[in-house]
Amino acid sequence: MKTKTLKKDKVNIITLGCSKNIVDSEELYSQLKANDFLVEHESQEDDANIVIINTCGFIDNAKEESINTIVRWAEAKEAGEIDKLYVTGCLSQRYKPDLEKEIPEVDQYFGSTHLPQLLQTLGADYKHELIGERITTTPAHYAYLKVSEGCDRPCSFCAIPIMRGKHVSKSLEQIETEVKGLVKNGTKEILLIAQDSTYYGLDLYGERKLAELLRRISDVPGVEWIRLHYAYPSQFPLEALEVMAERDNICKYIDIPLQHVSDNMLKIMRRGITGKRTEELVQTIREKVPGIAIRTTLIAGHPGETEQDFLDLCEFVKRNRFDRLGIFTYSHEDGTHAGEMLDDVPQEVKEERAAMVMEIQQGISTEINKTRVGKTLKVLFDRKEGGYYIGRTEFDSPEVDNEVLVDAKTNYVRIGDFANVLIESAEDFDLYGKVIA
């Protein structure tokens, strides 16, 4: 058992889930630092006496990981290895009464929007003057920027509105201030995130302001890459594509979760778009932003998905040859519209369908990657690992997309720097090359 001392409290923040949770943890981290707390993010030293877990409650696997993490640290508290345990984030927002009953060792549970209350419990003040300033936990050269919170979309499968509330945009001025602060601290790549980035500004300004937002960020000196994530396909603001095409520091990249293409499934999923319009949008994006890499995510096994619906989805993937693609198996979520439906696709069928789509995508990715061989690409290097410097092109987002590897024995780059790389070979999801002058 750890001996109690009079040493100053030290906080360890553990983040689970998506990039939006990373931003939330960074804001908590920054507030605690400003209150003179000793604080680390996912400390490897195991010497903190206060642990805060920022949970995810999006799908079954994420919920299971969050619960397992809470249980692990609850046991550590019971063993006297830590003094206090707090839980925040989406899982806590959604299931607080159940969690309080099942894991009472946690000192207090907070929702995803309860940062001031959490700080107060820790004896810290919420410093409003820090709005727009944030200590990042990602590598210094890139940072996620959350442009809005919550979502107004009625998608059948999604519990985000339950956990995060309705859509609330940050002001253009606040975002611009935050970007300037990030750049001042060495950030070169801004990754724009939101539950629905295309809805940005509608609540504040009465119209979609994504195009203006992109222009404003692009104009900030020092911003070298801007990357757009989580664009909703229905009522997509096409004027944003014109800005992407004309600005060199906006990556030719878009993450647009389409989820499905069958009219039957799009209606059941309450996506507000048809398969024909979805396909037309994909073509319009490619026409207006030549050379753009499109990343999408899909869902396999949503209630009501027939074999024909799934075959239509496979043909859609083959036809449109997405540069990057991920697929989830449907997760039945209480409180959602689909949660009231019969979960009628067996789990093994969901997994088989997801595997089939990824097999198709693997072939497409290999073919696209082979077209890069012999070309020189601008690469931003994220890390050194296993004898390689590892970086990304403008067509790739951190953690989820392809990477470029150069041999550290014969090449030298500084982490966080850009370099021109001649691509010499390609695999399914990786490129290999050498740095050239």
Image: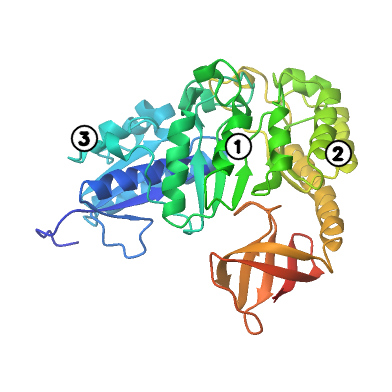
Marks 2 and 1 sit apart, C-alpha to C-alpha, by 36 Å
Task: Look at 21% across and 35% down and name the residue there.
Answer: 120
Residue 155, position as x, y percentages in the image:
64, 22
Nearer-N-terminus badge (3/2): 3
Q: Amino acid at mark 3?
A: Gln
Decide: is 326 above or below 80: above
Residue 430, position as x, y percentages in the image:
73, 63
Q: Nearer the viewer, residue 333 or 421?
A: 421
Task: Look at 54% across and 68% down and name the residue there.
Answer: 415
Image depth: mark 3 or mark 1 in front: 1
Residue 55, position as x, y percentages in the image:
43, 40
What SS does tag 1 mark? helix
In the picture of the structure, the residue carrying the numbered disc 1 is 215
Q: In the rendered image, which quarter contains the N terminus?
A: bottom left
Q: Amino acid at mark 2?
A: Cys
Q: Is residue 350 left or right of residue 382?
A: right
Q: Is residue 28 left or right of residue 308?
A: left
In the picture of the structure, the residue carrying the numbered disc 3 is 120
Q: Nearer the viewer, residue 8 or 288?
A: 288
Q: Is residue 192 left or right of residue 80?
A: right
Task: Look at 9% across and 58% down and name the residue there.
Answer: 6
In the picture of the structure, the residue carrying the numbered disc 2 is 314
